[in-house]
Each structure stands twice: as structure tokens, then as C-alpha cells.
Amino acid sequence: MLQPLQEPFMQRALVEVTLVGAAGGALGCWIVFYGLSYAAESLAHSIFPGLVLAAIAGVPLLLGAAPAIVLAALAIALCARIAGVSREAAVAVVVTTMFGLGVLLALSPRSPPGVESLLFGDVFGATNADVATAAGLAVVVAVGLRLLHGQLLIAGFDRGAARSLGVSVPFADAALLVLLAAGTVVAVQGLGNLLVVAVFVGPAAAARRLSSRMLPMMALAAGLAVLAGVAGLYLSYYAGTAGGASVALAIVAVYLLSLPLGRLARANRPSEGYDRRMTEPEPST
Amino acid sequence: MRPEPLIEAAGLAAGYGGAPAISGVEFALAAGQTLALLGPNGGGKTTLLRAVLGELRPVAGTLCVGAACGTVPQTERSRLDYPVSALEVAMMGTLSQLPWWRRPGRAEREAAARALDRVGLRSLADETFGRLSGGQRQRVLIARALVQAAGVLLLDEPFSGLDRPSAEGLEALIVELAGEGRGVVIATHDLEQARSCDLVLCINGRQVACGRPEQVLADVSVLEATYGGAIVEIPGSEGRAILPPHHHHH
Ligand SMILES: Nc1ncnc2c1ncn2[C@@H]1O[C@H](COP(=O)(O)OP(=O)(O)O)[C@@H](O)[C@H]1O
Ligand SMILES: [Mg+2]
């Protein structure tokens, strides 16, 4: 159990998945409730050309991913304004174009070897700088979620009433997307382009089945994501499987485990044995 | 001198781009008054409420709203599995009174608990919103409006899906809240409830009529223009009309 901890690359990988898992799990609860799972996946795919360019130029991946994600967001906004093009179609067109571009670049003779690590992640290759970036991300996400909590809660519950409650729905939506973009750009280092969405969606979907309040759900999702991350790394270390894929697999396992557990939790909740709606009299005033 | 109306609309039209969904809306609501909004599905009741709420800009005419609006929106399935308690929903009413960096604290929690008490739900404060009955959920949303210190209450088909006793309890609460000087607008399909309001506004795309219920509802041509002639009067119901194609909501 402790032996892998001697290895510096394993230490960095563990810190990296802990930071990314905590931030991604908590943020993921909002992604799930705002119906943004598809958007999360699209964002991740659309940064592929940026990653490849960064790898070719030999600069940190973040420097390629950040402009790519901004470009994709702008292109989606522009395409959606063309009459007769739905938002969903716009996303599909832009994402396939960007991803295709990334593949073209990756297949070019100038691309360095190891491009598949951009697709599947290279969590054991995390440098000290990568870990520091992940720490920065975790802080930004934690502060952002803390400041936005009330607004996100209202805009997600009741879009129509949000304005009268002092919440701007476009602002809440945009702020959430910015946090998601920041999270994706950083998490993609460890999990890769194809698997990064797992850390946002999997733990949150599992926590949703086990908890019926937002804050406990976010804490649980963060905990589950970290747990799955660590378990994935150990699996990878001992079984020799790919790092990012092992983490993604562990996340899927956590979700599958939450299915029967969620059913149990529901059955054991005190007022759920009978239907309270039927037995509780309406108060009369 | 008459008191300033809480809401005043003149020649109001609003919609979603393209032809306006509602037009020719003309009414004034004073403090303490209740207004019933009658119309078929798609007649523009929700649209009018959204305009009053400031969500939709008027495309013609004027609309003055002189008080904070609290809203009880139409029932929506997605809200039922949202992870919030009754108390947390009521506390949403405090957000606009807090600076952006502050989280609601003890004072806000207490204000929300008082509002839940006011609507008769103190004992259910910690229950998940989606697990409450329909009538209880409407009360929680009313509590949220009370926490907001709303001078105007907008209720969108609050009685839909409620059984008779729940609907009557809710109606009594609404009358009480109006009696404390709030203006209340209720979109409804129930003519009987409309009769007990101070004002009735009939809308079917265009405003058909607005006035006191005994005048507006006595005129069969008004009801026909509102509902497109699809009215079936149940014999012996003493004017309690049942509207077959509309009474189920979505
Ligand atoms: N978000 C929307 N976008 C475009 N049209 C809408 C929207 N909401 C409602 N409408 C249209 O506006 C009209 C009035 O709808 P609504 O105000 O919801 O009626 P009601 O509440 O009386 O059932 C309908 O024709 C409806 O199709
Ligand atoms: Mg409606």
C-alpha cells in the first residue's frame, strides 16, 4: 500500500487526482443539475487542436487549451446565431470541426510522438508545474462555487423567478461555463481529452443518488472523485493499466456502486416508507 | 384621492419576438386587491405574469410596477428532484438583500423560518421541496415571496392539481395576504375562484375584458371570446362552468 508512495511520480499523480477530483466532483454537481454534461464533453473535445499545437510547440498544454476553448465557445455562439441552426447543431458542428482539426495536426509529420497521451491523459507524467496549476484551479473553483452558490441554487431551481430574486440567469450560466472551462483545461492533463468528462459527470451522478441536499452532495461527489482517482492510480500502478483510463474506470465503478446504495438510502429514510403527502394534513389558515 | 396602483398597464403588448403573444392589456391593481387572470391554455396568462415580473419587455404600451414582485410559478417537474429543503427555498428570498460576498446566515434562516410559520409549514421546514404535496409546495413558494417582502404576489395556476381542501386552504391564505395590503394576481382556470376576486381580466392573445367579476363573468359573449366557445355548463352547478379542453394543465 505504502510502497508506491515512495515514488515521486506517484506522489505528484496522487496530489494531482486529489485536487482535480475535489474540484471536478463539486463543480460536477452543478454541471449535472444544469444539464451541461453534453456541453462539458464538447468543451473537452474542442480543445484537442490546442493541445496538439502546444505539444508541437513544446509549451505547457494549458497555453494551447485555453485559447482553443475560448475559440470554440465563440464559434458556438456565432453558429447558433445563424437562422435555422439550433444550439445543439452549432455545438456538434464546431466540436467535430475542432476535433477533426486536432486529428489532422496530430497526424502531421511535425507532431511529436506520444500524441495519444493527449487523448487518454498522462497522469503519471504530471510535473510540479502541473500540480501547482491544479492547486490553483482547485482554489479558483472553490472560491467561485462559494461566491456563486446562492445564485446557482436559485437559477437552477427557478429560472423564471431568478430575476425577481436578484439573480441574473445569463450571468450564472456564463460563470458556471467559465468554471467548467477552467476545470476542463486543467483536468485534461491527467485524464486526457476523451476521458476528462468522467470526473465532472460520474461522481456527481453517483452523489445525486445518495444525497438530497446540494452542499452534502457536492462534498460527497468531491470525496468520491478523489477516492476513485486514488483507486485508479493504485490499479494502474499494480496492474500496469493506463493511468487516465484506470481513473475513468474507477469513476464508472463508483457510479455503478451508487445504484444499489442509492436504493438502500431511499428505503431507509424515515419518512419514505409511507407517502407523507397523503398522510400529512394540509395546514388550514 | 385614490391610492397609487401597485401595477398599472396601458395598451400593453409583449411576446417572444415576432407577433406579440399578448396585446391590448389594460388594468390597474391597487394594494389589497386580488385580480384573477382567466384564459385558455396558450392564452397568454403566463406571458402577462412574466411581463409584470420584468422578464419580458413590453413591445408596446406601458407597464408600471410599483413594488417588488414575488412569484409562484407554474408547477414544473424539474423542480421536484432539486436537492433543496423547504427552508432553503424560502431562504432564496433573502439573496437580493445580501451583499454578493455574504452567505445567508442566522438572521436569514430565521426570517425564512418565520415565513414558513406564517404559511403553516413550520414543521416541514427540513423536508425536501419535491417531497411536499402540491399545496405545500405552493405555500413554500409563497413563503419565499414573503421573505422577499414582495408587495405584489403573482401566482400562476396555483390551484391546478390540488384537491378541494388544499385549494380552499390556499385560497384563504391568499385572501389573508391580500388583506395585509399586498396586490395579488392569480392565473386560474376556475371561474368560481375568479368570482371571489376583486377584479377579473380575461385574455386570449388580446385582452377580452377587465373589470369587476359580477360584470365581466355575467357576459356570456366575454366568456365565449375568452375560451373560444368551448364552455360546458354543468346543469345545477349554478354558474360553475367546467372547461373541458383546458382544465388539465401541463
Ligand atoms: N418561451 C416562449 N417562446 C416563444 N413562445 C412562447 C413562449 N412561451 C409561451 N409562448 C407562446 O405564447 C403564447 C402564450 O403562452 P402562455 O403565456 O404560456 O399561455 P398560458 O399561460 O395562458 O397558457 C402561446 O402561443 C405560446 O405558444
Ligand atoms: Mg401558463
Image (cartoon, coloured by chain):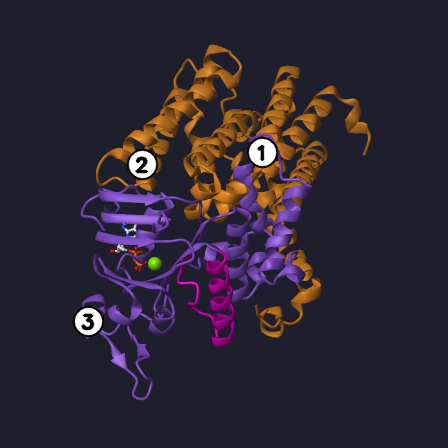
Chain colours: A orange, B purple
Give residue B25's position: percent from left, percent from top.
24, 53
Q: Residue B148: where, in percent of width, then height? A: 52, 46
Nearer the observer, A189 or A156: A156
Q: Please give the range of residues in magenta.
A: B155-180
Dot in front, 3 or 1: 3
Check if mark 1 and mark 2 are on a common chain: yes
| Disc number lying in front (1 or 2) | 1
| Quarter of the rendering occupied by the C terminus of chain B | bottom left
Q: Secondary structure at mark 1?
A: helix
Q: Which residue is mark 3?
A: B224
Judging by the rendered image, the residue that carries numbered circle 2 is A90
| Residue designated by label 1 | A145
Protein chain holding label 2: A
Q: Are marks 1 and 2 in contact (CB under 8 Å)?
A: no
Residue A241 in view, yes or no? no
Residue type at numbered disc 3: Glu
Choose between A138 and A155: the one closer to the eye.
A155
Measure how far apart labels 3 and 1 are at the Cα level: 52 Å
Q: Residues within 10 Å of mark 2 (few under 14, many from 20)?
A: some
Is label 2 on the same chain as label 3? no
Distance of mark 2 from mark 3, alpha carbons?
A: 45 Å
